[in-house]
Amino acid sequence: MERKPTAPVPAPAPLLSAGLLLARNHIYTMAWLDRDLFVSGRFGELTPQLQVGEPLSSGLPVLADYEDDIHALPCDGSTSFELPGIMLIDADGTPAPRIDIVIFRHTAVVAADNPASTNGSEEIHSEDNGCEFLLLVTRPGTHSTEVAVARLQRDRHMLLEDIEQKKLELDRVNAELEITNRDLEDFATVISHDLKAPMRALRYLAEDIEKAIDDDEPEAARTACEALKKQSRRMSTMLSELLDYASVGRKKEILEPCDTRALVEGISASLPRPAGMNLHIGGQWPVIETYVAPLDLVVRNLIDNAIKHHDRPDASTIGINATTSTDTLEISIEDDGPGIPATLQEAVFYPFRSFSRQSSAAHPENTESSHGMGLAFVKRTIEAVGGRLSLTSAPEWSRGSTFRVSWPLKLD
Amino acid sequence: MASKKVMLLGEIGVGKTSLVNRFVSGRFRTDYMPTINVEIYTHNLPETDIRPALALLIWDTDGNFGETIFSSVYLKNAAAALIVADATRPATLLAMTSLSNGWRAAMPGRPYRLLLNKSDLFSPDQPIDLPAGHEKHHDRPLRTSAKSGDNVELAFHSVADGIIRRGF
């Protein structure tokens, strides 16, 4: 669509000569727009695509989405619509100069009696002495400076991001160090306290042997020797378990597909239990990619723990359930045994601690078959994969304990 | 031919300009020229079975805007957005999630697509960790590479289709 330009309005000579100089050097373009946003006049070469008689949106399509804002401008000569610092890139990727666009709406006041001439490309028109739009397109600043500043800003931003990333890494390493320090403290505690008892027993037995030899009692010496060998084996087993405990999480595991229902059913079938003890497996057990051996260790120890420590094994139920959340497999092992007092609920996860149903304290385990490492292994294994273990039990109110495992579904 | 305005949003240096250059000119530029304010590309899309021919006005924005872009004049009447992250930089993934939340609040109902650019640096089956909770609110991002051209056409065409499908 094309409109016939309205009559030219000459501009004042001094302004026009300066304006011509700048306009010819592509410093700016001024254009007059009618009420329908058609170009009625144009001055300057910065945006040659603006053509007299054409709609504004033909010459500057980027303004098509702003016509409502432009129409809404008050006719006061001071309120403006502005679209600063845009750069138009042509179809072959060549950028035009960066431009600022400003539009005012005002009543035309350009002196009509100024004889300053216009030439072919600089046409000035007015419209009906009413309100019209004045469009000014200019080139802002020095582009090369802007690019240099932008490059610096980008480099600074990337450096800050890198520092932040390094800080996160440092925090992670510090957290690992903290865990390692705690492990060392655990070890020190175990060695100084829990290994003292068998060491002491060894010393006493050696003294017994010595005395039996002095008293010429070979039978007593032989008995003490047997006891000494037994204590020695026990210490050896404890040290091996301690080493295994220390290595949890350090061994590189391999992700494998795991049918968790088959896994838990297999474990349940393999653990001996009294005839009256009922194991109930419920819930949803998905097939997941996970570290199978550690998961097996966790589930096996928790079920075994529930079986071994039940005080009424001939009429009991152990419930093993699972649900899946977004990020974790939630496993619960619930027994109807005597429960674990609140005062012991932290200690049962320490190495070489076992809770006796007849005792009110967790103590170093002394039985031949168990060394009180099961729950310690479970907790450490779960934490090594980034999971969580919790225990709920309130024997003063009701029987039973529930161990809940949050096993991450996404493992590296 | 109708023209539609598509915003390219994302942190500094994620490859927004490289993506639009790849789409418009089929080239990958190795010299880094930071975008200042806004650079506007025009690209005509031919008619397809599901939409008419369209002229896309692609507004490539300065990563420095961050979320202030949503209160700027540049966003006015945008029909769609491509929100880009650098798959190798976790901070830009967080920014992508924030920007997509901002887009949904500022331009409700308008289509957008999330892009994980520089995915040529990952093997196809290698997972890229997204910020926690991201997938609750947003579609899975499309892996793109301005360098290899992978999925670049698909990204722009899919937002064009989205614009027509949703009547913007």
Image (spheres, coloured by chain):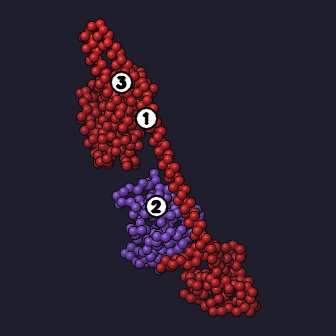
Chain colours: A red, B purple
- Give the Cα distance between marks 1 and 2: 38 Å
Residue A366 percent coordinates (x, y):
34, 22
Q: Residue at x 47, y 45 (%)?
A: A172
Answer above or below: position of A113 versus B6. below
Residue type at mark 3: give it.
Glu
Q: Are marks 1 and 2 on the same chain?
A: no
**Residue A336 seen in render:** no
Is disc 1 in contact with disc 2, using a CB cutoff of under 8 Å?
no
| Occupied quadrant, residue A269 | top left
- Give the Cα distance between marks 3 and 2: 54 Å
Q: Residues within 10 Å of mark 2 (few under 14, many from 20)?
A: many
- Give the Cα distance between marks 3 and 1: 20 Å
Residue B92 percent coordinates (x, y):
49, 58
Is disc 3 in contact with disc 1, using a CB cutoff of under 8 Å?
no
The residue labelled by disc 2 is: B86
Residue type at mark 1: give it.
Asp
Chain that bears disc 1: A
